[in-house]
Image (spheres, helix red, strand yellow):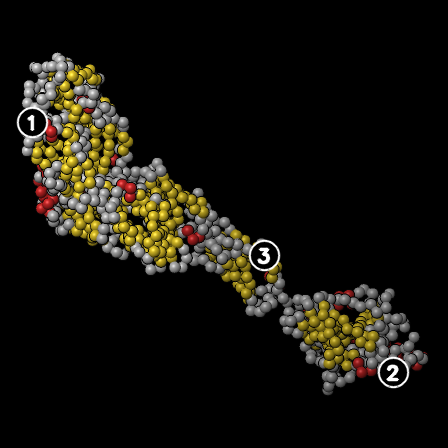
Amino acid sequence: MLLWVILLVLAPVSGQFVRTYKSIIFLQPPWTTVFRGERVNLTCKGFGFYSSQKTKWYYRHLGKEISRETQKNTLEVQESGEYRCQAQGSPLSSPVSLDFSSASLILQAPLSVFEGDSVVLRCRAKAEVTLKTTIYKNENVLAFLNKTTDFHISHASLKDNGAYRCTGYKETCCLVSSNTVKIQVQESFTRPVLRVSSFQPISGSPVTLTCETRLSLERSDVPLQFCFFRNDQMLGSGCSLSPKFQITAMWSKDSGSYWCKAATMCYNTTSNSLRSWIQVLIPASHPVLTLSPEKALNFEGTKVKLHCETQEDSLRTLYKFYHDGVPLRHKSVRCEKGASISFSLTTEHSGNYYCTADNGHGAKPSEAVSLSVTVPVSRPVLTLSSAEDLISEGAKLTLHCEAQRGSLPIVYQFHHEDASLGNRSAHSAGGVAISFSLTADHSGNYYCTANNGFGPQRSEAVSLSITVPVSRPILTLRVPRAQAVVGDLLELRCEALRGSPPIMYWFYHEDVTLGSSSVPSGGEASFNLSLTAEHSGNYSCEANNGLVAQHSDTISLSVIVPVSRPILTFRAPRAQAVVGDLLELHCEALRGSSPILYWFYHEDVTLGKVSAPSGGGAYFNLSLTTEHSGIYSCEADNGLEAQRSEMVTLKVAVPVSRPVLTLRAPRAQVAVGDLLELHCEALRGSPLILYQFYHEDVTLGNSSALSGGAFFNLSLTAEHSGNYSCEADNGLGAQRSETVTLYLTGLTENRSGPVATGVTGGLLSLAGLAAGALLLYCWLSRKAGREPASDPCRSPSDLDSQEPTYHNVPAWEELQPVYSNVNPRGENVVYSEVRIIREKKKHAVASNPRHLRNKGSRIIYSEVKVASTPASRCLFLASSAPHR
């Protein structure tokens, strides 16, 4: 097969002209779409003598191209993209796109389809797809394959052009569709052209017919057969591999319409040439063809006259005119003195002309006359081509300028923004081209001019934009103050100083994408961020214009968090704060950048300050006194804005002092049946205070009071003589009063009679004298700064023995006795006193011991004793007061 290709290249007379412009890629398997994970072998074939030598490969995907070189002409691939190759000694191939699909269903088709090919379209599915396949062409159902995977086109032709796809069913859900494959049927070879060695052979002379065609690059190794016809009758013994047919002698009967046919070996593709007329001439005198005007410039539109004449003209002579062997229609004239035809020149009129003269003995041809029609150049067309999909710096750019019409030679000149790039002269059709490597300065407008001596023609301008890779971007951070603070608006600006637009910018925080922004016309992009505490860290940005991505330097940002409103809490050794306890004040702002300075306040008076360098809370200790009750608060400040806590109220509890017990009776002489009022009061102590009343350590009852003490009433009986006390408790420790002794003497019957009165009066007089002496003694003792040696109300032998009773009846007025044990100014001398209070309202009760010292009261009995003595105070009351 290689020998066949070499022969085709070396033997252009064979009639098959193979273009050797490009290398060609062949696929194995022959599909352009396969499943991901599969492999495809690429084979690169050139048309030189070095196809098995080193091969260059180019792979392009997502705007990036990778090149490599292999020792042989094969390459195994498994990645989607565009592949090209260049075999040694041959130019670069056309691109081949491969798709390694991850779809569930794909339709596979060959890379190229030519007329007459037997084509297989293969519908392949993964395991989850049921192949109950339907093939569509141009969205119309073409065939149902059922469980077959292949659809066959037995003899491809132009009618098979179109878009194909197939469908199947997923087992779990639904109908799935494959990729779409476009099929474009190509010609294996060009339409043949019949070349004739002579269209007007002299009778008896040989004629050679040549059937010329050109094979497609991909079908360069396909052998063809050639057949020749005259007036629809095949010449010779049939078709052969030779594109030439030799007629050894042509006679007048052989004149007629000749054509040829080229076909592949299997006759599945055929193509016929146009018909050409061959006229066999009988030997005679040859006519002479003249052209007028002869030497003038023959421009388009000029009127030209052709005249044909023989030496032996007659009325029977038939003249015909030919242009490049093709008879000119309606140009056959019978005349006596030659024949003439005229026409206005067009570009198609260039070529060789001759005429024939036939007097019935065979046509005689004239000598050919060449006519060249001078055509001014048309407006040229400038095209730009590059090996790169993206016109980027370093890419090789080719400028091609071509005028579709115009007489040769044509001088082409190339321009960039009115600056000349150079010129080229073309002596054949097809235009000219120049190439150069691109730089950023090559962006702009390009045009070319064409001139063949009749004035230049200028092409349309073509704009070229050179894509410059982006430079490393610069990231800047902007905040409204010197230090970034939570809640501030942070503006991130990213700019690549060099690079072709559009540029896509991406913004990152700790390598996590914040967002992106596209800049269509270049320049910088910005991104705004409302700062939180989590936004501290490293920031960067990236610029990308499709060629290469560039990352900026990293910038660190520290976001300061303003302190939140702090929380003030108390910590004490017990549930209730008590005088003498150590109170710990704890202030903490749950949010805020360190260091934080904490201030502590009591009733808006500063107690002190504590700094927390690494965040957290702060502590302040107080040894509690009664003055520490009140409202507390704290303040946190980290230099941005101070925050004050809510007010917290602290109540410092005071333990109760030793209570004072006071007894009140309705009269001076307490008797059985009287109502005795007991009043107990602690002068110090936090409310609520619970008071307990005792008689001989037996509980009489209790009562609670917020202030002023508590009262307890008792209807006296003979058993109520004895020791009374009370106890005060506010939960911080109970305190017991001094004991007050009450004696009830005498009978409960009527106490009338002069004897009782006299006795009582005498006793009271003696009691008054004794009391006066006792008070004077106590006063002198206190004045001397010392205590009495003994308690006068106690017996030397027994402190708890019964005291004597004294009576003092002041003029029989109805008086209210008040009994109390007094500890003046907190000293250790205690005395009991009885006051008589005139009252307007019966059973009035004093709510405070100070009330007992009214100016209207008179002390009727007083006894002094030492407060530290555990014995109770002595109170003597006459129980036999006269009855009124």
Above or below — where is 789 with respect to 153?
A: below
Amino acid at the residue labelled 2: Leu
Mark pair 1, 3: CA separation: 134 Å
Mark pair 2, 1: CA separation: 193 Å
Residue lying at the far bottom in this picture: please name it.
Answer: 797
At x 23% / y 51%, what residue is drawn? Answer: 30
At x 48% / y 59%, what residue is drawn? Answer: 617
User: Is 614 positioned to the left or the right of 386 in the image?
Assistant: right
Residue identified by numbered label 3: 647
Labels in figure, total: 3
What number is the disc on residue 203?
Answer: 1
Is mark 3 in CB contact (under 8 Å) with mark 2?
no
Residue 819 location, quadrant:
bottom right
What number is the disc on residue 747?
Answer: 2
User: Is 525 positioned to the left or the right of 679 in the image?
Assistant: left
Residue 442, visible in the rendered structure: no
User: Is 723 positioned to the left or the right of 406 in the image?
Assistant: right
- Neighbourhood count class around disc 1 (C-alpha, 10 Å): few under 14, some 14–19, many 20 upward: many
Secondary structure of the residue carrying tag 3 is loop
Residue 311, visible in the rendered structure: yes
User: Is 164 positioned to the left or the right of 93 in the image?
Assistant: right
> Closer to the N terminus: mark 1 or mark 3?
1
Q: Position of residue 486 (x, y in %)?
A: 46, 49
What number is the disc on residue 60?
Answer: none
Q: Position of residue 598 (x, y in %)?
A: 50, 56
At x 57% / y 56%, what residue is drawn? Answer: 646
Residue 697 location, quadrant:
bottom right
Amino acid at the residue labelled 1: Ser
Q: Position of residue 862 (x, y in %)?
A: 78, 74
- Neighbourhood count class around disc 2 (C-alpha, 10 Å): few under 14, some 14–19, many 20 upward: few
- Neighbourhood count class around disc 3 (C-alpha, 10 Å): few under 14, some 14–19, many 20 upward: some
